[in-house]
């Protein structure tokens, strides 16, 4: 799996304001920003992202996935540190 395909898959599955994907060799970092994360707990946010990649995780195309799922307000506070 490459970062372009991951980004495309996330943007197709979810309505995102921002989508950043980094990584290689099965280890990836994802930063996604959307209002859809506002009512969700951190665990629910991660579950939503993992659900997009369930097939890739099952086949080990994605071995490790670090997720930052943020609301626009959280992104405004944190984007300077990322």
Image (cartoon, rainbow, N blue to C red):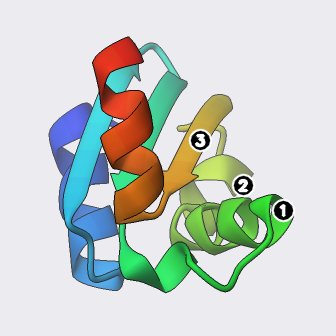
Give the position of the C terminus as an image quadrant.
Answer: top left
Residue 38 or residue 45, whichever sits in front: 38
> Is residue 20 shown left or right of residue 46?
left
Q: Tell me the crowding category of disc 3: few under 14, some 14 to 19, or many 20 or more residues within 10 angstroms, Cα based.
A: some
SS class of the residue under badge 2?
helix
Residue 4 or residue 48, whichever sits in front: 48
Q: Tell me the crowding category of disc 2: few under 14, some 14 to 19, or many 20 or more residues within 10 angstroms, Cα based.
A: few
Q: Which residue is mark 2?
A: 58
Between the C-alphas of marks 1 and 3, the distance is 10 Å
- Residue 67, position as x, y percentages in the image: 59, 41
The residue that appears at 20% across and 66% down in the rendered structure is 17
Between discs 1 and 3, the one toward the N terminus:
1
Q: Which residue is mark 1?
A: 43
Between the C-alphas of marks 2 and 1, the distance is 19 Å
Between the C-alphas of marks 3 and 2, the distance is 17 Å
Residue 21 disc label: none
Residue 67 disc label: 3
């Amino acid at each position: 799996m490459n970062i372009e395909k991951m980004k495309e898959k996330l943007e197709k599955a979810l309505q995102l304001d921002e989508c950043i994907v980094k990584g290689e060799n099965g280890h990836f970092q994802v930063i996604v920003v959307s209002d859809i994360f506002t009512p969700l707990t951190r665990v629910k946010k991660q579950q939503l992202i993992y659900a997009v990649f369930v097939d890739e995780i099952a086949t080990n195309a994605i071995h490790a996935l670090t997720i930052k799922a943020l609301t626009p307000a959280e992104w405004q506070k944190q984007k300077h540190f990322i």
